[in-house]
Image: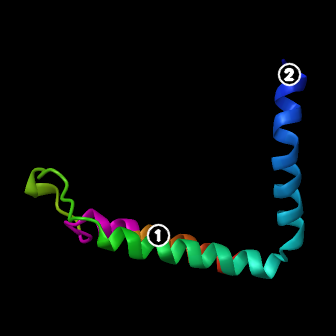
Amino acid sequence: MKEMIISLLRPFAQVCNRFVNAISTDVAAVIYILVMAAVAVWVLTLKQEKPQKVNSAGKGLLVIKDLRYWAVLILLLQIIIYVVFR
């Protein structure tokens, strides 16, 4: 059974391996940044989401009511971290 599964998946694995080896690291970085930016744009197109209201006595400085903006902020931080530490 194991050999049958391996023989079925081997052509797909070889195609993936050739694809990965054909792309340079600079192109991979650009693809990563473009994918993260596309996800950020997609998140902004989703409907507005609001977290449940919590006791207002514990409000901090960073009160963003729409969760989409937190998601975009996290995606931007991921892009910045990748660019800085690449």
* Residue 84 point in image, percent of width and height: 67, 80
**Real-space Cα separation, disc 2 to disc 1, in angstroms:** 37 Å
What amino acid is found at the position of numbered circle 2 in the picture?
Answer: Lys
Residue under circle 2?
2
Dot 2 crowding, Cα within 10 Å, few <14, some 14–19, many 20+: few
Question: Looking at the picture, how far across and down is residue 86, in whole percent?
Answer: 74, 76
Report if residue 35 lies within the magenta region: no
Q: Which residues are magenta?
A: 61-71
Disc assigned to residue 39: 1
Nearer the N terminus, badge 2 or badge 1?
A: 2
Return the residue nearer the eye: 18 or 69.
18
**Please, what is the three-letter code of the amino acid marked with disc 1?**
Val
Q: Is residue 86 left or right of residue 73?
A: right
From where the camera sits, is residue 86 visible? Answer: no
Question: Which color scheme is applied?
Answer: rainbow
The x and y percentages for residue 39 are 47, 69
Does dot 1 land on a helix, a strand or a loop?
helix
The answer to whether any part of residue 28 appears in the image is: yes
